[in-house]
């Protein structure tokens, strides 16, 4: 019995000792945070990101180290927090009045966060230091609420069509002439299909793997559901046509085939495109890094999204992240200095090249596209991605009805499951969203 | 005979109590004599073995993924056996983040939470189960009610509260509340205390014992299995807690294992092999603990340690 | 004599308060404030950061009259609770009965069956998404051995909730632990007496074991009911983008509340939702408590 007791005591003492008691120091920790300065008299900036992986972390930390060395007033401290949860925590910290100084957040909800006063209005800094022309206009516009910016674009993405050149060759298609219209896409897909006794050895193309129906609607319409006056329009003849076209693929391959592949893709392991079981797929350009790492031998090409019909435009869809200053942050000037550095050409180029990621800074993106650090394939994909930015639209969350998609998606599910017609699904969506807007007004 | 390390004093004292109360000895309800018993045992054994295989087979996927290269994980269709058994993945996983530090941190919090829960809940539950007092039913209803409000809506005000206490970036918000009881555990232990015969307590009172003494000397030992259950549940809860540490800790040196595991989950792709290896490593102590701890509620029918 | 009894009772009361005092302190210090706040804010348009104006019962009224997703989510949750609570309870009792025996390797088996309850996090849900893959998943593979053409599980709105219930059954190990602990308290004498009367195994199980563990069955039913209404993570991870699809079939109450609170920042609205849920669950729990004396048997109870 004494033995047990002493063991527990030793254990407790050991644990306390090893933890350095850091988790038990209240006052000192907080004093430090409130002082806003480190011993050398520098202003300390708390920077929260979700970049904790072995690949991303060293890159962002190198950028931070470069910034810290570039001047002697500000010291940036990086904290990794898991994706998604970082924003829950940010919100709690804002509510408690002690937020971090800079946070990487979703670009599409920036206006909403501006409206709710979660993010700081940056126009005071932009008046003296207008950096808006560094970025793709579509990205910049997404950060605006009532004409004022609440976050500075950091990185972005777009959607392009990846296709398997060997499969093209095998099916008698020209690997250098990928489909450019929906009609061609459908035709090529049928040619690329390879049937076997018990299903498919190869699927030509299924439009709803990699992206949702909304990207195809965007592609066909060349614009978002919401116009500048917040009018919502989804119930159109064209959209009905688009939906029926999408559904025709499901009818073509059959429910079971689609579900089985879908489950595999959803599990985020083992992608049929890597193994040649799927000949074409719409993906972000960064999909290339997975091909590079997991399917080195794949002979693939990349092209902009086909257009609805000739001359309709190759509109694509994108998103991205901004660097924002949470409302109530203590050192906005120093934070602004850091954000400027973060979104300037040097840091952005470094990020773009090292991560193979699309960046918001135009000059940096174009410099990266010429980078000699990429392989031939890498350069091909990256250049296509940069080119594609001119067709790329964002879908910022409408402040008037931030959750409108939760009213549309179930109807679309019903449509694809066959329990609603396209017309019914669109009509119901139109009606539901309109009443939501009315309710919120 | 060595006492197992997890054993604490009040659990030991049960032995002395055998003269007061009933013992926990409990045979199988299937116990029979002779062939029939053997036959049943065999049937049950196979039933359990088959069920066990079904339970385990999903886990094989975790193990197998943890031993593959990422290229193999990403291959389609998925392979059942790893091509090469990369045990080095476990080492790489451990080195991908300061996991040793995280283990110590997690252990610190967990031990405190378990101690807090075991002490406070058994004390509080005794009050609710065995002492009549005015307003007891209303108070107990409030205890239960605290379980019914989803945590999301109190998350922000609670964070603000702990911020006001200057407890952000410390372990206090994670373990101090455990010392004041939790509804689930209070309710659980109350149910067990309710089954202690009132005569037993009356008898002790006749001999001049007060409630503290009765709780310590009769209540605790007789509810040993339940307390072991609370300890195991609390250990699990604290060990696997993700949102709590995430919200309240800002300094990466204070992070816990569950936060550490998240580094393998990227925004676009996940390093499944390391994530699975990490999950299995994190799982191990919990399983070991259970394996050892279960003897507290399985006394009397212990085949393996026949010498005990 | 009478006077002495009175002081005795008062003395008892004081003891009672001392014993529950830690909980009262903890409740007042950590829980009461946030609860009161969330109740008050449910009558406002609180959005966490910039507004908190009194709107009366608008949130409640809006939920009941204008919000079809509220009703969808409530229905989904009730469906889940109605099936998962009885099934997991029965499953756990059955399992613990099997595991409460003198069988070689029993410690190993117990650990094995407890294992799924310990596993948590996204990995497990991803694992299940793979197992439930309609084409190549293990579940449908096993079903096909018996000539059953398995359903589309997570892709068919009619099967999504059964999928989650199935998953819950896999991890009944937690409740099993409770029942095992409780079965330890059943006196050996009772079984011996029954054996002398010639009772067989099943008779002993239903007439001794079950009645003796009713306090814990009651506990398990009440807490899994409360817990069932809070289902969130499974649906959040296992539906596309955490939206509760397909066709809103996994839009559970807490998932919808989460979206309102943390994606739309309608925290006041979410708080109103939480209090409606509270009333529902509280009501069901009270029914449970009222019914309890009819079937829950406390050995220690004063007759």
Image (tube, rainbow, N blue to C red):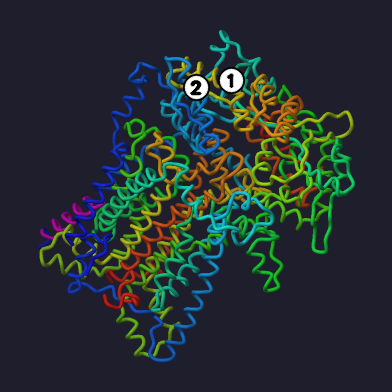
Image point (70%, 26%), residue name: A369
Mark 1 vs 2: CB contact within 8 A: yes
> Can the viewer see residue C240?
yes
In 3D space, how far apart are the residues under numbered discs 1 and 2 (Cα atoms)? 10 Å
Q: Where is residue A378 in the image (x, y as percent from the top left)?
A: 70, 34
Q: On the picture, is A290 further left or further right than C298?
A: right
Q: Judge whether residue C193 is colored magenta.
A: no
Image point (87%, 44%), residue name: A188
Where is the C terminus of chain C found, in terms of image quarters? bottom left
Disc ID at residue C122 = none
| Residue carrying label 1 | A346
Marked residue chain, label 1 = A
Is A406 rendered above or below residue A229?
below
Q: Is mark 1 on a helix, strand or loop?
A: helix
Q: What element carries label 2?
A: helix
Q: Earlier in the sequence, mark 1 or mark 2?
A: 2
Give the magenta part as a residue range: C4-20
Q: On the picture, is C242 further left or further right than B116?
A: right
Q: Where is residue C113 in the image (x, y as percent from the top left)?
A: 46, 66
Q: In which quarter of the image is residue A352?
A: top right
Disc 2: CA contacts within 10 A as few (<14), some (14-19) or many (>=20) = few
Is A183 rendered above or below residue B292?
above
Q: Position of residue B27 (x, y in %)?
A: 34, 79
Disc ID at residue A66 = 2
Closest to the observer, B305 or A307: B305
Closest to the observer, A262 or A56: A56
Q: Position of residue C186 (x, y in %)?
A: 33, 74
Q: In which quarter of the image is residue A111?
A: top right
Q: Quadrant of residue C1?
A: bottom left
Q: On the picture, is A374 further left or further right than B162?
A: right
């Amino acid at each position: 019995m004494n033995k047990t007791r002493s063991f527990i005591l030793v254990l407790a003492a050991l644990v306390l000792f090893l933890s350095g008691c850091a988790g038990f120091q209240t006052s000192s920790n907080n004093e430090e945070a409130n002082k806003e300065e480190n011993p050398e008299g520098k202003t300390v900036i708390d920077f929260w990101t979700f970049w904790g992986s072995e690949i991303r972390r060293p890159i962002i930390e190198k950028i931070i180290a470069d910034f810290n060395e570039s001047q002697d007033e500000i010291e940036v401290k990086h904290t990794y927090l898991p994706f998604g949860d970082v924003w829950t925590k940010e919100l709690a910290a804002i509510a408690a009045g002690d937020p971090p100084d800079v946070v990487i957040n979703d670009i599409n909800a920036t206006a909403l966060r501006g409206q709710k006063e979660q993010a700081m209005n940056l126009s005071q800094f932009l008046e003296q230091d207008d950096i808006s022309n560094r970025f793709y206009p579509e990205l910049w516009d997404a950060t605006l609420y009532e004409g004022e910016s609440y976050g500075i674009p950091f990185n972005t993405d777009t959607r392009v069509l990846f296709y398997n050149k060997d499969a093209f060759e095998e099916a008698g298609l020209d690997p250098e002439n990928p489909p450019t219209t929906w009609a061609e896409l459908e035709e090529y897909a049928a040619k690329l299909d390879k049937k076997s006794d018990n299903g498919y050895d190869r699927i030509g193309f299924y439009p709803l793997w990699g992206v949702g129906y909304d990207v195809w609607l965007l592609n066909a319409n060349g614009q978002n559901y919401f116009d500048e006056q917040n009018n919502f329009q989804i119930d159109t003849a064209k959209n009905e046509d688009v939906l029926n076209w999408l559904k025709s693929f499901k009818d073509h391959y059959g429910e079971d085939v689609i579900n089985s592949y879908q489950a595999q893709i959803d599990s985020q392991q083992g992608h049929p495109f890597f193994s040649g079981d799927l000949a074409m797929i719409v993906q972000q350009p960064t999909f290339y890094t997975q091909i590079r790492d997991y399917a080195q031998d794949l002979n693939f090409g990349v092209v902009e999204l086909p257009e609805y019909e000739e001359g309709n435009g190759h509109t694509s869809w994108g998103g991205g992240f901004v660097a924002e200053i949470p409302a109530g942050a203590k050192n906005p000037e120093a934070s602004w200095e850091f954000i400027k550095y973060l979104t300037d050409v040097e840091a952005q180029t470094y990020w773009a090249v090292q991560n193979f990621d699309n960046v918001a800074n135009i000059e940096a993106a174009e410099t990266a596209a010429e980078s000699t650090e990429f392989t031939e394939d890498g350069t091909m994909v990256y250049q296509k991605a940069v080119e594609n930015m001119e067709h790329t639209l964002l879908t910022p969350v409408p402040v008037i009805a931030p959750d409108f998609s939760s009213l549309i998606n179930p109807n679309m599910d019903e449509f694809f499951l066959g329990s609603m017609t396209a017309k019914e699904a669109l009509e119901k969506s139109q009606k539901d969203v309109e009443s939501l807007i009315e309710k919120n007004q | 005979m060595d006492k197992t390390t997890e054993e604490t004093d009040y659990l030991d004292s049960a032995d002395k109590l055998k003269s007061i109360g009933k013992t926990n000895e409990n045979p199988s309800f299937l116990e029979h004599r002779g062939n029939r018993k053997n036959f049943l045992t065999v049937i049950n054994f196979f039933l359990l073995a088959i069920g066990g295989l079904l339970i385990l087979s999903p886990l094989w996927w975790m193990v197998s993924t943890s031993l593959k290269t990422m290229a193999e994980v990403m291959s389609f269709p998925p392979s059942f056996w790893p091509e090469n058994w990369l045990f080095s993945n476990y080492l790489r996983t451990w080195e991908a983040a300061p996991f040793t530090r995280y283990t110590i941190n997690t252990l610190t919090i967990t031990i405190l939470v378990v101690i807090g829960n075991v002490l406070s809940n058994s004390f509080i539950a005794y009050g609710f189960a065995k002492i009549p007092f005015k307003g007891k039913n209303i108070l107990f209803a409030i205890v239960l009610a605290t379980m019914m409000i989803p945590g999301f809506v109190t998350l922000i005000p609670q964070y603000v509260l702990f911020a006001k206490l200057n407890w952000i970036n410390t372990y206090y918000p994670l373990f101090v509340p455990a010392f004041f009881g939790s509804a689930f555990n209070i309710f659980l232990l109350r149910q067990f205390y309710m089954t202690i015969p009132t005569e037993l307590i009356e008898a002790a009172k006749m001999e001049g014992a007060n409630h503290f003494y009765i709780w310590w000397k009769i209540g605790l030992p007789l509810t040993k299995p339940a307390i072991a259950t609370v300890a195991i549940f609390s250990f699990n809860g604290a060990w696997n807690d993700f949102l709590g540490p995430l919200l309240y800790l800002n300094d990466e040196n204070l992070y816990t294992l569950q936060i550490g595991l998240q580094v393998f989950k990227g925004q676009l792709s996940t390093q499944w092999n390391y994530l699975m290896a990490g999950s299995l490593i994190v799982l191990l102590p919990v399983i070991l603990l259970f394996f050892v701890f279960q003897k507290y509620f399985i006394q009397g029918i212990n085949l393996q340690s026949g010498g005990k | 004599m009478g006077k002495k009894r009175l002081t005795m009772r008062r003395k008892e009361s004081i003891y009672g308060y001392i014993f529950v005092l830690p909980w009262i302190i903890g409740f007042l210090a950590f829980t009461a404030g946030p609860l009161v706040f969330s109740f008050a804010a449910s009558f406002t348009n609180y959005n966490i950061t910039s507004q908190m104006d009194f709107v009366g019962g608008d949130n409640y009224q809006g939920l009941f009259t204008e919000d079809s997703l509220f009703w969808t989510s409530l229905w989904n949750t009730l469906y889940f609770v109605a099936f998962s609570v009885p099934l997991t309870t029965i499953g756990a009792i059955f399992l613990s009965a099997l595991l409460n025996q003198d069988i070689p390797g029993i410690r190993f088996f117990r650990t094995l069956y407890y294992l799924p309850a310990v596993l948590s996090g996204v990995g497990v849900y991803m694992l299940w998404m793979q197992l439930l893959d309609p084409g190549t998943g293990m579940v449908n593979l096993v079903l096909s051995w018996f000539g059953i053409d398995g359903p589309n599980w997570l892709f068919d709105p009619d099967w999504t909730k059964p999928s989650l219930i199935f998953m819950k059954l896999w991890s009944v190990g937690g409740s099993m632990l409770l029942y095992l602990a409780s079965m330890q308290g059943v006196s050996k004498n009772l079984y011996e007496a029954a054996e002398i009367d010639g009772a067989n195994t099943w008779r002993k199980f239903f007439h001794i074991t079950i009645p003796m563990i009713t306090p814990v069955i009651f506990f398990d039913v009440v807490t899994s009911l409360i817990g069932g209404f809070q289902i969130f993570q499974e649906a959040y991870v296992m539906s596309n983008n955490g939206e509760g699809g397909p066709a809103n079939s996994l839009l559970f109450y807490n998932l919808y509340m989460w979206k309102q609170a943390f994606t739309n920042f309608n925290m006041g609205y979410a708080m109103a939702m939480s209090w409606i849920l509270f009333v529902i669950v509280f009501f069901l729990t009270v029914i449970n408590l009222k019914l309890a004396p009819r079937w829950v048997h406390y050995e220690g109870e004063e007759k």
